[in-house]
Image (tube, rainbow, N blue to C red):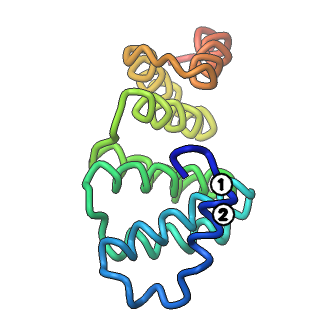
Amino acid sequence: METGDVEGAEKVLGTIKFPNLLYKPIRSVYYTLKGNLAMMKQDFDGAEKNMKKGLDLGMPMKEAEGASLLQMGMISMQKNDLKQGESYIRQALRKGLPDKENQAAAYLQLCSIMMTKREFRAAKDFFRKAKALKPTTAQIVDQIKQIEKYISRMPG
């Protein structure tokens, strides 16, 4: 998975016939990986189901828990469930995210949720937090540039 060999990772995960026999922390990672693979295939229901299983088992590393919660928030956003998405993203920020890029992505998601809810002051606050982290990922930088066009015209 780390080297980008998605087919190889799927093949290895497919060889596990009885995931309940895995030790709890390894089982948690197994379901998280299955969720990530489903996410890549745009299978949001399958991704959500597997990610929830992984989270319910407890994450072996605490920073991985925040990242998984952030992914759950993104899945909820894809399904247009803003309330659940906001809840997951806020939980992810409380648990802690592994790097500034993930934090910036979380704040940008919260910003867009607040814009949708027409809570402009909160949206501007989350936007400032995201921008202050100085993310370098092209996708996040592009999102910041796009939101910057609209945010100055917002009341609040």
Which residue, given by chain and number where applicable, does mark 2 sit on? 38
The answer to whether marks 2 and 1 mark residues whose Cβ atoms lie closer than 8 Å is no
Residue 60: horizontal and vertical position, in percent?
26, 63
Q: Nearer the viewer, mark 2 or mark 1?
A: 1
Q: Residue at x 35, y 72 (%)?
A: 26
Left or right: 4 in relation to 68 = right
Q: Could you say which is closer to the camera, residue 56 or residue 5?
A: 5
Q: Residue at x 52, y 30 (%)?
A: 108
Query: The residue under label 2 is which amino acid type?
Result: Ala
User: Which sits earlier in the primary sequence, circle 2 or circle 1?
Assistant: 1
Residue 67: horizontal and vertical position, in percent?
41, 49
Q: How crowded is mark 1: few (under 14 residues within 10 Å), some or many (20 or more)?
A: few
Residue 143: horizontal and vertical position, in percent?
63, 22
Left or right: 115 in relation to 31 = right
Query: The residue under label 1 is which amino acid type?
Result: Val
Which residue, given by chain and number where applicable, does mark 1 sit on? 6
Q: Residue at x 42, y 71 (%)?
A: 54
Residue 15: horizontal and vertical position, in percent?
58, 80
Res 140 → quadrant = top right
Disc number at residue 137? none
- Against 46, residue 20 (above or below) is below
- Element type where label 1 sits in the image: helix
**In the current view of this chain or complex, which residue is farthest to the right?**
42
- Against 67, residue 108 (above or below) is above
Q: Residue at x 64, y 60 (%)?
A: 8
Q: From mark 2 to mark 1, how far is it between C-alphas?
A: 11 Å
Q: Residues within 10 Å of mark 2 (few under 14, many from 20)?
A: some
Res 145 → quadrant = top right
- Element type where label 2 sits in the image: helix
